[in-house]
């Protein structure tokens, strides 16, 4: 049986200074009433906040300067990202672009795509959606049916995507579509394209979620145009491209910190705001377990960031952290039932009851998005040599 490796990692020397500057920026925004800390904050769209992060140098952090980046290390970026998530700052507008689309473009995009798009992402002014799932292919991504046809002046795309988060606010999607015919195997004949969402032939319709919010969409493409130099990688390389993209999508602290802001607010109410109150043994045990769990997940997640920095591809370790981490994120609002003397409900967005109610309604999606637990466990079993 194979074994997992999670080598220990030293955080960069400037980690404390970086942390302090992120905290300062978030505090200023909270005090000015411009943002309200929330769980699941990487789904909250706030273009003005993204621009502030861009101006502060917190986006495109690891990319070359000539593309608007800051040539920092993966671990320095990790510090910034985990601080923003732990604080519950609204980072949803730029999230996909900064986490994965920009890397795809940097590694596999044309020079025009790099020079025209990356500086805008790093400035917090250009947002992306992920065009993978289709009405009949979610877990089975290789079954996508949307198709691109080569013409004299570029590619023409027709088909449909579903569950596309933020597509209604995104400037572009990176979409996986079929370019090869029946002669190709399922994983062959697929290609990724950068699709401009602001063009005729694209219809983006909302799908409302459990709390009535509009986060994701169904999209139809009717002969949409993509210039030749907006292809990612080579024609037919889409499966390898999408696998590499998923490694970025699955490995970060967003896969275990989604409900951490709620845990923080609950702890403040239970402990810090009532210093004379003594926790019961059962309360202390629940809180202690949650905190030690989050610390263990963080140690594993930082180790993955360290491996990525070394150029490794810890795909199975990332699947393990996502599986354990998203289970943890879902557990937090459930566990609070035995601790908080209030009911979870929607109302004043500053209230703990609202924060809890929203997290409760969002949490079923935590273990689905980015690949379900069953799919990840299949990968983990394969990685361990068990299947
Ligand atoms: C909040 C949210 C945001 C999302 N955002 C995006 C986005 O921006 N872009 C995008 O492309 N997609 C997005 N998705 C889609 C997400 O990636 C899919 O929902 C997910 O991959 C599962 O696909 P599906 O919904 O088609 O379910 P199915 O694949 O139909 O799965 C249904 C059930 O069967 C199980 N199952 C399927 N195959 C197997 C198997 N081989 N072995 C064992 N069990 C299996 C699954 O685990 C699941 O429980 C989002 C989803 C959510 C919930």
Image (cartoon, helix red, strand yellow):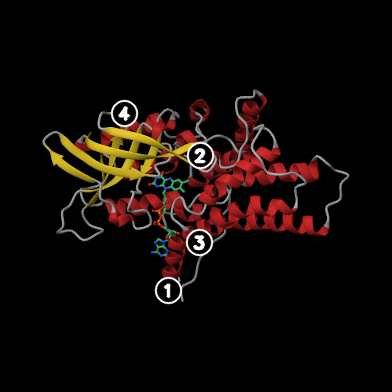
203 on left or right of 59 = left
Alpha carbons under labels 4 and 2: distance apart: 21 Å
Which of the four quarters of the rendered structure image does ligand 1 lie in? bottom left
Q: Which mark is residue 43?
A: 2
Say which quarter of the image contains residue 88: top right
Tell me the number on the disc at residue 202: none
Residue receiving disc 3: 320
Badge 4 is on which residue? Answer: 198
Query: Disc 1 designates what residue?
Result: 385
Does residue 82 appear anywhere in the picture?
yes
Mark 3 against mark 2, which lies toward the viewer? 2
Secondary structure at numbered mark 1: loop
Rounded to the nearest angstrom, the CA distance separating label 3 from label 1 is 14 Å
Label 2 and label 1: CA atoms lie apart by 35 Å
Q: Secondary structure at mark 3?
A: helix
Q: Are marks 2 and 1 in contact (CB under 8 Å)?
A: no
Q: Which residue is situated farthest in the top direction here?
A: 32
- Which residue is situated farthest in the left direction here? 152
């Amino acid at each position: 049986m194979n074994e997992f490796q999670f080598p220990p990692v030293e955080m960069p020397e400037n980690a404390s200074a970086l942390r302090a500057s992120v905290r300062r920026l978030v505090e200023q925004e909270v005090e000015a009433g411009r943002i309200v800390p929330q769980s699941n904050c990487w789904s909250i769209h706030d273009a003005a906040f993204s621009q502030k992060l861009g101006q502060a140098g917190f986006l495109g952090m690891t990319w070359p300067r000539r593309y608007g980046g800051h040539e920092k290390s993966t671990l320095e970026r990790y510090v910034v990202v985990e601080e923003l998530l732990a604080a519950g700052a609204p980072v949803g507008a730029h999230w996909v672009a900064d986490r994965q689309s920009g890397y795809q473009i940097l590694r596999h995009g044309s020079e025009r795509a790099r020079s025209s798009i990356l500086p805008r992402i790093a400035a917090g002014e250009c947002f992306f959606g992920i065009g993978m799932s289709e009405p009949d292919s979610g877990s089975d991504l290789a079954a996508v049916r949307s198709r691109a046809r080569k013409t004299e002046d570029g590619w023409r795309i027709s088909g449909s995507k579903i569950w596309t988060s933020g597509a209604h606010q995104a400037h572009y999607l990176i979409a996986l579509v079929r370019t090869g015919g029946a002669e190709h195997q399922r994983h062959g004949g697929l290609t990724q394209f950068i699709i401009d969402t602001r063009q005729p032939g694209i219809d983006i319709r909302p799908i409302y979620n459990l709390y009535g919010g509009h986060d994701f969409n169904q999209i139809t493409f009717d002969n949409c145009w993509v210039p030749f130099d907006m292809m990612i990688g080579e024609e037919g390389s889409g499966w390898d491209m999408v696998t590499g993209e998923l490694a970025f999508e699955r490995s970060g602290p967003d896969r275990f910190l989604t409900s951490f802001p709620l845990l923080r607010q609950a702890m403040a109410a239970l402990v810090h705001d009532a210093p004379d109150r003594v926790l019961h043994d059962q309360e202390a045990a629940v809180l202690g377990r949650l905190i030690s769990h989050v610390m263990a997940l963080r140690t594993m997640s930082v180790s993955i960031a360290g491996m990525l920095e070394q150029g490794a591809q810890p795909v199975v370790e990332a699947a393990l952290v996502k599986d354990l981490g998203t289970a943890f994120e879902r557990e937090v609002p459930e566990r609070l039932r035995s601790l908080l003397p209030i009911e979870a409900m929607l109302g004043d967005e500053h209230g703990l009851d609202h924060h809890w109610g929203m997290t409760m309604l969002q949490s079923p999606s935590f273990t689905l998005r980015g690949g379900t637990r069953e799919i990840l466990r299949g990968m983990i079993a394969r990685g361990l040599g068990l299947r």
